[in-house]
Amino acid sequence: MKQRPYNFSAGPAALPAEVLEQAAAEMLDWHGSGMSVMEMSHRGKEFISIAHQAEADLRRLLAVPPNFHILFMQGGGLAENAIVPLNLSGGAAVDFVVTGSWSQKSFKEAKKYCDAQLAATNTADDGSHTTLPAPATWQLRRGARYLHVCSNETIHGIEFHELPDLKALGSDTPLVIDCSSHILSRGIDWSRVGLAFAGAQKNIGPAGLTIVIVREDLVGHALPVCPSAFDYKTVAEHGSMFNTPPTYAIYIAGLVFQWLLRQGGVAEMERRAAQKAELLYGAIDASGFYSNKVAPGCRSRMNVPFFMPDERLYAPFLEGAVERGLLQLKGHKSVGGLRASIYNAMPLEGVQALVSYMTEFQARHG
């Protein structure tokens, strides 16, 4: 098969070619059923088997304990900014650590439903986010219903490489993590987490599916105004089939989970992520031409924003990148510059091709 371009989009993002090929082969007739997955009843035996396998594979990949529910929902990470406080806050105190655009959105949305307060932030005077506040400095309220962090900020390229241990800080507050843009690139210490959520379109599958993994004792406390379809208790009791879920997105996610297992699981993805990130950041730091503004110990292994010394260079850089099959490298509009998202589906060869082009471009324009 002809080499596909390397897609560095932050989301919806690239999928493994093997997954796309399998989906194409099964498009008209899934396993002799005579139906496409898109045509199946979500309560029929065929789709139920797909959903059960996807859930089991995800539980295996992330070593999710049996006292956590895995829910397949809709609305993306943005909707979870409302759905989480509707389920967990009780309208009471909730703490937030704001480290970039996504946690800022979460904080703002939660204020509609509860007493949301800022426990810590890395926001500089100029509005930038380049480091992480040390957990020992966080102002945690006693009795807060949960603490929210975005464990990987897609836009600013900041990652918690270790989740905070709230118990070590003297708090029994459950930790909620938005891990949309680095889920399945590393393990999750479930002893430190009460709820994890992720929009699928970055590192799992197509847009439309949201994964929620929630400890069972946190389920069943939704505010009366919470819509039934977003009440975690209702969703869990109906096996994520209370309303019609995003069936095709679940199917594709399931294929991705199987692909990950064949590759060696999350441990292998973490090894590859470190290798790819080291190559790209190394090229940026050594260049004297490109720059990354994030403190080295906080740099994301999934989303790498970088900049050049002259704004006039971005247009020709992007044009040349497309000519070489390097797609979607434009930085987010709120930050500018360039950004390479190097999720699990991005092979090492794609990062090598990008670094080679960056070197070539610098030689001509540096």
Image (cartoon, helix red, strand yellow):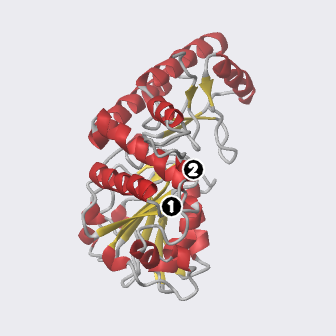
Residue at 25%, 71% (x, y): give it.
Answer: 167
Residue sitting nearer the eye, 279 or 1: 1
| Residue 139 visible to an observer of this rendering | no
Q: In this orientation, which residue lies closer to the viewer: 277 or 202?
A: 202
Q: Position of residue 179 (x, y in %)?
A: 44, 55
Which residue appears at 74% of the width and 26% of the height? Answer: 315
Q: Quadrant of residue 255?
A: top left
**Alpha carbons under labels 1 and 2: distance apart:** 9 Å
How many numbered callouts? 2
Which sits in the foreground, 8 or 244? 244
Q: Amino acid at mark 2?
A: Met
Q: Is residue 19 visible?
A: yes
Against 264, residue 143 (above or below) is: below
149 shown above or below 234: above
243 and 217: which is toward the camera = 243
Q: Residue at x 43, y 54 (%)?
A: 46
Quarter of the figure with the C terminus = top right
Label 2 element class: helix
Which mark, by number, is residue 60?
none
Name the residue beneath numbered marker 2.
38
Q: Is residue 162 above or below residue 92?
A: above
Q: Which mark is residue 42?
A: 1
Circle 1: residue type:
His
Query: Residue 302's x, y, as percent?
Result: 46, 40
Above/below status of 167 relative to 277: below
